[in-house]
Image (tube, rainbow, N blue to C red):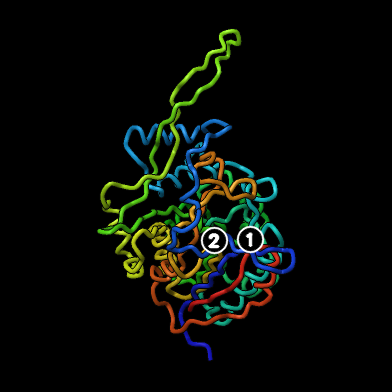
Amino acid sequence: MRATARANFFLHVTRQPVLAQGGGMLTLPWERRSFTRAGPGPLDFDTTHSNKFGPTALEKILVDSIKATGPLQVSRYMQMCLSHPTEGYYMKGHVFGARGDFVTSPEISQVFGELVALWLLSRWMEDSRALPVRLIELGPGRGSLMEDILRTFDRFPTIRNSHLSVHLIENSENLKNVQKAKLEPFSRKNGDRISIQWHHHIQDIRDKTPMYTMVLAHEFFDAMPIHILERTAHDFKEVLIGTAQRKISRQSSIAYRRTFIVHPEFFLQFVLSDTSTPTATLLASSSSRFSNVPFGSRLEISPTSWTIARAVAELIKYGGAGLVIDYGDDHVFGSSFRGFRKHQIVDVFDQPGHSDLTANVDFAYLKEAIGPVGLSTDLINLSVLRRHLIRGWLYQRVLWVL
């Protein structure tokens, strides 16, 4: 018998790329390397490579900032690379799809969104039809998932007439315009359609009216800023991003001189803080799991994700359902920080501002932030959804936590 609970939260899916030929599975090196530093990982790549395209505009900004104030935290580097007002990766167009740098499952087939919609409907019909429904999506991308969900909802009068409001958490004005164009057919015009609102942060949703809240986060938390800590013999130190200098020789443009011009070039690299920083001390104590890692281990911790998860728990306290689909597992990772460009994994310092940056999600950390919201933990059977995801080279297992 299903345990009674006010909120069904939360479903998470572990992402592992699948090898198409022969039905075998291909697990990338960073997928299960939570603590080990043996063998190459994204933090062990040669980051002193010469960029054949030259430094990007954002890279120049980063180098100047480090020269002026010292090494950057990895979280700050991610924020600037992804969300800088003019040079940030997500502030530009065409990052999704075949023309972009990666393809998400809603872009592969509308079946994905329809299955998610049916799962949300089943939770709502089982739990509470009395409250107004609030649907929240974190990082909606191009709006494809929400479009498929709303189109499916439109076929069910009960949910369509439930005073449904949609809230999209989006910082990119470019993506916001794409979402508005795609979702315009569903928006309220004469009072008979859906209210759709945009917010920069989930904390901006301030309506405290009791509602049945559905929260979606599809490939959202993996892009949240992380801090990287390293366990030393005495304490945790923070892995930072600094610069180094090398001399580059280039032939003079004046052909008859045949001389070489030597000038310095700065590049980005990881550095370790000399002493433990206040941030390292605070984050190392934020979960009891972190105290048990071996010396020399690195931890990727996202306090931003923790804060967002707490905000979700507050919104869902009157009842609701949550779905989180992302890279990750129920443990902390140490070497999953990586870049994506043109559907390939690239070095995190390769073309800053022109590549997506991600890190695996520690779902156990999110659950600690959310706290107990029910009475049981179950493995749910969404075999059709699971098969669809695996066919799309995406995910292996589904775990639902009440």
Residue 340's place in the image compared with 329, above or below, is above
Q: Quadrant of residue 235?
A: bottom left
Q: Residue furthest right?
A: 22
Which of the labelled discs sits on residue 347, or is there none?
A: none
Residue hosting label 1: 145
Asked whether 222 or 201 is in front, the reply is 222
Mark 1, secondary structure of its residue? helix
Asked whether 169 or 1 is in front, the reply is 1
Residue depicted at x 39% and y 54%: 228
Mark 2, secondary structure of its residue? strand
Residue 302's place in the image compared with 242, above or below, is below
Image position, residue 384 (x, y; %): 69, 75
Can residue 167 be seen from the camera position used here? no
Q: What's under tag 2, amino acid-wise? A: Glu
Q: Residue furthest top?
A: 256
Image position, residue 390 (x, y; %): 67, 68
| Mark 2 touches mark 1? (CB < 8 Å) | yes
Residue depicted at x 44% and y 66%: 312
Q: Quadrant of residue 168?
A: bottom right
Asked whether 303 or 112 is in front, the reply is 303
Of mark 2 and mark 1, the one earlier in the sequence is 2
Number of residues whose C-alpha sits closer than 10 Å to that of mark 2, classed few (under 14), some (14–19) or many (20 or more): many
